[in-house]
Image: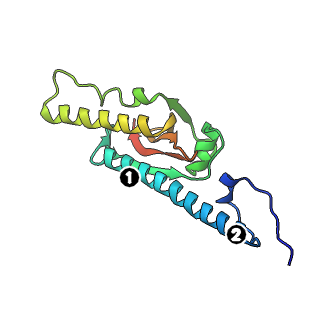
Amino acid sequence: MPPVTAMFTLPQVAHQRILIFNGGLCQFISKYVLTWRSEQMSNSDEITAKLKDASSGLVMPSESDYPFEPFLWSGTKEPLTPEKILELTNHPQNSPVETIDLPYLFRNLAQEQEWHDEQQKENVGKYRKLLEVLESNLSDIQVFRVGEINIDVYVVGKIESGDLAGLATKVVET
């Protein structure tokens, strides 16, 4: 039986079906794919765990307080646009989308004020830690606010694999 050939590049292998090859090439590719997938999953799992840990017990204050929920969007390699965020979050394509800076989102949460009590000062430290975790684990961070009044907020950045990860929460503004 003649060897079967296929054209691919190794980083794409994990997302494609692999044909059986003659000899050791199949074993090499299988080992590479399993190792690569394992490394990618552990990196993704590690980052979402860090985000979950850093946001645990914190809420996004507004007229109603909502927790932060970590997420991972695998396989999204396109640039992140308002249209893409609506698609990824299953919002109607005519939903209003606003982009803001990460520091602006946390402007009232990560700055200690002289009138803060001890609990509020402790929370400022937790929000600062959350910002540090976001900035040290995600690149190209963007913040999207989707909707009006009941606004879904997505803090989204890239991880090493190129996938998107971040935190989702909600604010209510009447």
Residue type of the residue flagged with mark 2: Gly
Residue type of the residue flagged with mark 1: Ala
Residue found 43% across the figure and 48% down from its top:
47
Residue found 30% across the figure and 48% down from its top:
56
Residue found 82% across the figure and 65% down from its top:
5
Tell me, for residue 59, which label it has, or none.
Answer: none
Q: Secondary structure at mark 2?
A: helix
Q: Position of residue 109 (x, y in %)?
A: 30, 31
Q: Residue furthest front?
A: 24
Q: Position of residue 19 (x, y in %)?
A: 75, 69
Which of the 4 image quarters holds residue 62?
Answer: top left
Q: Position of residue 73 (x, y in %)?
A: 54, 51
Determine if residue 130 is in view: yes
Q: Are marks 1 and 2 in contact (CB under 8 Å)?
A: no
Name the quarter where the N terminus is drawn.
bottom right
Q: Secondary structure at mark 1?
A: helix
Q: Position of residue 93 (x, y in %)?
A: 64, 44
The foreground one among 132 and 94 is 132
Q: Is residue 31 above or below residue 145?
A: below
- Classify residue 27 as left or right of residue 157: right
The foreground one among 129 and 16 is 16
Q: Is residue 67 above or below residue 36?
A: above
Q: Residue furthest left?
A: 118
Name the quarter where the C terminus is drawn.
top left
Which coloring applies here?
rainbow
The foreground one among 139 and 111 is 139
- Classify residue 6 as left or right of residue 142: right
Tell me, for residue 49, which label it has, or none.
Answer: 1
Q: Residue furthest top?
A: 114
The residue that disc 2 covers is 24
Q: Residues within 10 Å of mark 2 (few under 14, many from 20)?
A: few
